[in-house]
Amino acid sequence: MPTYTLVHVVISLVGIGTGLVVLAGLLTAKRLNGWTALFLASTVATNVTGFGFPAARVLPSHVVAVISLVLLALAIYARYARGMAGRWRTVYVVGAVLSLYLNVFVGIVQAFLRVPALRAAAPTQSELPFQLTQLMALVIFISLSIAAVSRFRVIDYSR
């Protein structure tokens, strides 16, 4: 695996791993400031480094990266500039969880491209195993996003 690809994959895995930790924090009403900063930074880096691969045209991965970067910008703004006050809490939670979902979505695509058994099960990624996997991931993340919005509360310790 070329060095650039390896760096991109490692950053992506860090983003997914830290994102899962942050998601667990959201579901248990814990801020996890350090984990959150690492998640947001690594997920931004994942998206940005994805543009470094040669491409003759705009690919679906580029569109996903742009959407993710917009969501991340909103989440970062909501968390750090707006302090998650009022509706900004929901913007942060939804932006963070959907950014994690998009990282997982791309991970599933890559797994079906690179893992021989998965590639054999869905060589064009239009087959049922791929579609069901992506549908399950989507349903899981929508459910987790709803749960995180209802469970994650911002506690103002300054009062």
Image: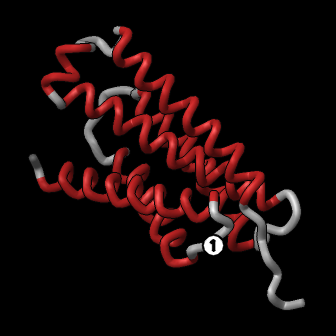
Residue in the image at 9% along x and 46% along y: 1
Secondary structure at badge 1 equals: loop
The answer to which of 149 and 105 lies nearer the viewer is: 149
Q: In the rendered image of this protein, does residue 4 appear above or below residue 35?
A: above
Counting every numbered tag in the picture gives 1
Q: Is residue 86 left or right of residue 10?
A: right
- Which of the 4 quarters of the picture holds residue 59? top left
The image position of residue 69, as x and y in percent, is 55, 50
Direction from residue 37 to residue 8 in the image, left or right: left
Q: Residue at x 70, y 64 (%)?
A: 77
- Pinpoint residue 17: horizontal percent, then vertical percent: 38, 58
Q: Which residue is mark 1?
A: 31
- Three-letter amino acid code at disc 1? Arg
- Side (left or right) of 52 relative to 75: left
Q: Is residue 159 left or right of residue 138?
A: right
Kindly identify the residue that appears in the image at 43 percent across and 49 percent down.
47
Q: Nearer the viewer, residue 32 or 8?
A: 32
**Residue extending furthest toward the top:** 127
The residue nearer to you, when weighing 19 against 51, is 19
Farthest left residue in view: 1
> Measuring 16% from the left and 22% from the top, which residue is drawn there?
117
Taking the view exactly as shown, the residue that stands out farthest to the front is 28
Query: Residue 72 is drawn in which quadrant?
Result: bottom right
Q: Please provide percent x and percent y for residue 124.
A: 28, 12
Q: Position of residue 60 (x, y in %)?
A: 43, 27
Q: How is the image coloured?
A: secondary structure
- What is the crowding at mark 1: few (fewer than 14 residues within 10 Å), some, or many (at least 20)? some
Q: Establish if 38 lies above or below 89.
A: below
- Which quadrant is the C terminus positioned in? bottom right
* Quarter residue 151 falls in: bottom right
